[in-house]
Image (tube, rainbow, N blue to C red):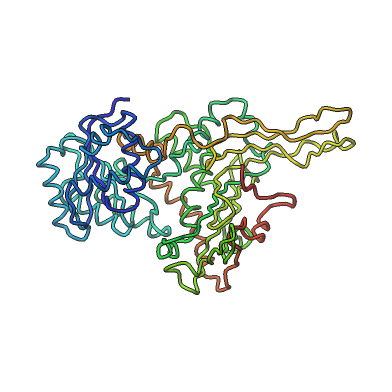
Amino acid sequence: MKQESCTIVIFGATGNLSRSKLIPALFHLEAAGRLAPGLRIVGTGRRDWDDARYREQALASIRDDRRASDEASLHERFLARLSYVRVDLNRKQDFTALADYLERNRLLAGGIVFYLAISPSFYAGAARNLARNGLSREDSGGWRRLVVEKPFGRDLESARELDRSLHEDFREKQIFRIDHYLGKETVQNIFVFRFANIMLEPLWNRNYIDHVQITHSERQGIGSRGGYFDRVGALRDMVQSHLLQVLTMVAMESPPDLGAESIRDEKVKVLKSVRPLTEDAVDDMTFRAQYAAGESDGQRLPAYIEEPEVPADSNTETFAALRLYIDNWRWQGVPFYLRTGKRLAENSSLVSIAFKKPPAQLFKQTGIDINRPNSLILSIQPLECIRLELQVRENGLEMKARSTHLDASSCALSASGIDAYDSLLLDVMEGDRSLFLRSDEVEQAWKIVDPILQAWAADSDEIPLYRAASWGPKEADRLFHRRGIRWRNTL
C-alpha cells in the first residue's frame, strides 16, 4: 500500500522507548520503502537539543539495531526527515510553540501522529494541551491520531478516569492504545491459523480441548526499573494487558469481516465471558510470588528486594499465575492458565493447547501410553513456531508408540526481521485499529484483574518466594484443575 505523507510527533523523543524501539522501527520502514517521501518525524523533549543533536542520537540508535542497514545514503535520507522541538510537558507555552512550528512548516494540513512515549502520568495533560492549541481538530482536512502506551491506568477506576480525560480532547477513533505484544508475528498468526484452516474448527471447543496455558517468562530481573515495577507488579505489567490479549485471540469467535470494530467486538465478548473472581475464589484460582536470590552460570543473582529502588519490605509480585474460565458455549468448563514471571529459567512466550485423552480402553493391553495427550503449541518468542504434538507407532514387532511433532514453520528466530513496532507504526499511519485496544476492551480487562489486586493488597501475609533462575514456585501447581498436569515451559 502506498503511504500518504504525514508527520509523526514523538513526545519523549530523548527517552529509552524512542531510542530503542521507535527510531529503529521507523528506520526499518524507511529501508523497506514504506515511508512516504514527504513524511516528517518531529522529536520533542525537555532537553535543549537542536536538529543536529537529535539526528546524532537517532543515528546512534540505528547503529545499535542489529537489523539496520549500514547503507550511508539510506541513513542520510532517513535523518533528513528528523527535526527537534523542545517541549517541557509541564509548560503550556511549549505546546503553543509546537503548534507554531507545525504551522510554519506547513505540517498542519496533513495527517499527524502524536506518539506519547512518556510517563502515563503525563498522558491526560499532554492530550489537553494539544487540544487547547487546536492540534486535536480534524477540520483542516488532515487527520489527528494519538498513540498511548500501556499501562492504561493502574486499576479499573484510574483506567476509567484516564479514558474520560482523553475523550474530552480526542474522539475514540483518534486514540490508538498500543500493546506491542499484538504486533508480534506469531500472535497475529493465531488469527490466520484459526480462521483460515477449516479442519481446526470442529476441535476448537470444550468437547476436545482439556485446557489452555499461556506463558510469558523472562530470565531478566527488573534491573533499573525497580522504582516503576514495584508500583506495578507482574499482574498489572503482563497479565492485564499482554496475556489477556493473547487469551482473546485464542478464544474469540470468527468475526464477520476483517474490519477493526468487528475483530474488537469479538475480543470484548471473550473478556465479558470470563467468570468473575469473587474474593473467596482469588485464593484458589490465583498465585503470586517474588524471586529470591539464585545462581546462574556461577554468578549470584540478587533477590528482588536487593534490586535498586526496591524497598526491603516489598510485597510486590514478580510472578503471577491464574486459572480462568470463559463461561460461553464454546469454552464452558475449559480452564485457561495464565502465567508470567521475572528471573525464571529461560525467556519463553507461548500458548499450549492440550487436547483431551483418547478413550483408554482401546490401548490398555498395549505399550502405548495415552497419558501424553496431543498438544498444539503456538510459540511467540524467542522462537516463532506452530507445532502439533501427536503419537505415532514405532517400527517393530510390538505395538508401541512414540511422540513426534509437526512444525508449521522452521521453529527458529524470525527470519523476516520485522519487529512488533514496525507493523504497529505502519497500522497507525494507515488508520488500521485492529491490533489496538478499544476503551471497553481495556475496561473489561481491568474488571477481571481488579478483584485479584484488591485481594492481594488486603493479604498481610509475607509473599512466597522462588529461587532466581528456576521455573518459579512449585506451589503454583495447585492451580491445576486435576492431577497429572504440568506447566509447559518451552517449545
- Residue 175 higher or lower than 403, as above or below: below
Residue placed most toward the observer, 143 or 55: 55
* Residue 331, image x, y percentages: 61, 41
* Residue 152, image x, y percentages: 38, 53
Q: Residue at x 21, y 57 (%)?
A: 47
Q: Residue at x 71, y 49 (%)?
A: 485
Image quarter of the N terminus: top left
Residue placed most toward the observer, 170 or 148: 148
* Residue 4, image x, y percentages: 25, 29
Q: Residue at x 29, y 51 (%)?
A: 166
Could you say which quadrant of the image residue 91 lies in?
bottom left
Image quarter of the C terminus: top right
- Seen as rendered, the residue at the extreme left is 104
Q: Is residue 251 visible?
A: no
Could you say which quadrant of the image residue 383 lies in?
top right
* Residue 415, image x, y percentages: 48, 32
Residue placed most toward the observer, 151 or 47: 47
Left or right, residue 42 beside residue 254? left
